[in-house]
Image (spheres, rainbow, N blue to C red):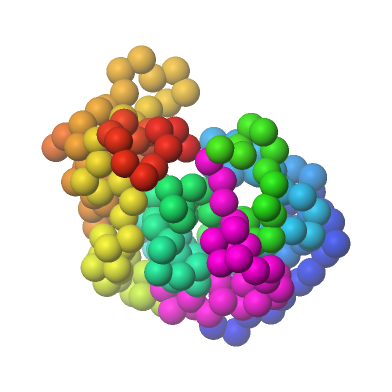
Amino acid sequence: MNWRIFRKAQTVSTNIDARAGRPGDVFTALWQSAGRGRLDHKWLSAPGKNLMMSAVLDASGLPPEHAATLPLAVGLAVADAAGPSAMVKWPNDVLAGGLKLAGILCERHEDCVIAGIGVNVNETRFPPAIAARATSLALLYGREFSLDEVLYAVLDALAVRFVQWRKGGLAPLMDELSSRDFLKGRVISVVQTDDDGSPVSGRCSGIAPDGTLTVAGRSIWAGEAHVMDAGDAPGVF
C-alpha cells in the first residue's frame, strides 16, 4: 500500500474528509468536533491526545457481504499494532485488559470503504461517562507515544491485513482473529437493535468466517454485545 497522508489540526470528522479521497489516502486530525463510532455513538477525545484517522480502501468489485466483514479485518490490524494483549471485540472494537482501546467505523462510499479508526493513545483521564471502561496505549505501556508512531504502526498492519482480506475475506485471517476474539467462550447478551426486548443470550462460540457472531448456536449479524459472566472484563461496553 502506498499511503498518502493528509493532516489537519481540527476537522468535523475524518470520515467526512475521506469522502473526497481515493484509495490509499489517509486523513488525520488532532481533534474532530463530530467524531462518531458505530450506531452514532460519539467518540470522545481530548485534542492532540489520541489518533483519529480514516483510510480510504478499494472495495471495487466486492459484494456487500464481503465488504461487511472489513471492520473485523481492520480491528485485527489495530490489535496487531497495539501489541499481544490487544483483543478484537465483535463487531468493531479493540480492547486491552477488558477495556476499550480503539473503535472502528467503516462506511461504504462509492467503490471504496472508508475505515475510520480511533485509538486512545496518550489520554490517561477519561470523561466520567467512559472512565470505567476505557484505556489507552499510555496506560497500557506506561509511557507516552508519538501519534505518528502509532499512525504508521496501524498503517503497516492495515496494509498486510487489507491485502489478505481483499483476496479472501476473513478466511485467511481466522486463526489470528480467533486467537484475539475477546467474546469467544464468554457468556454474553447481544442487543440487536436499540429497542430490542429479546436480546440473544448464551455462550459465545466466536466469530465465523462470514463475520457473524455465534451465540448459543445462533448466528448474529449485527448488534452490541454485553459480557455477563465473571472474569477480567467489565459487564458493558
Left or right: 6 with respect to 40?
Answer: right
Where does the image place residue 74, in percent across and percent down from the top left? 46, 63
Please tell me which residue is depicted at 34% across the width and 35% down the height of the picture: 227
Left or right: 63 with respect to 109?
Answer: left
Q: Is residue 158 magenta?
A: yes
Left or right: 155 with respect to 63?
Answer: right
Q: Is residue 148 magenta?
A: yes
Query: Looking at the image, which residue sits at the far top?
Result: 197
Q: Which residues are magenta?
A: 133-162
In the picture, the quarter occupied by the N terminus is bottom right
Residue 88 picture quarter:
bottom left
Nearest the eye: 82 or 53:
82
Where does the image place residue 209, in percent across and percent down from the top left? 24, 57
Residue 186 picture quarter:
top left
Please tell me which residue is depicted at 69% across the width and 54% down the height of the picture: 123
Where does the image place residue 182, in percent across and percent down from the top left? 34, 51
Please tell me which residue is depicted at 64% across the width and 32% down the height of the picture: 129
Where does the image place residue 222, in percent across and percent down from the top left? 37, 38
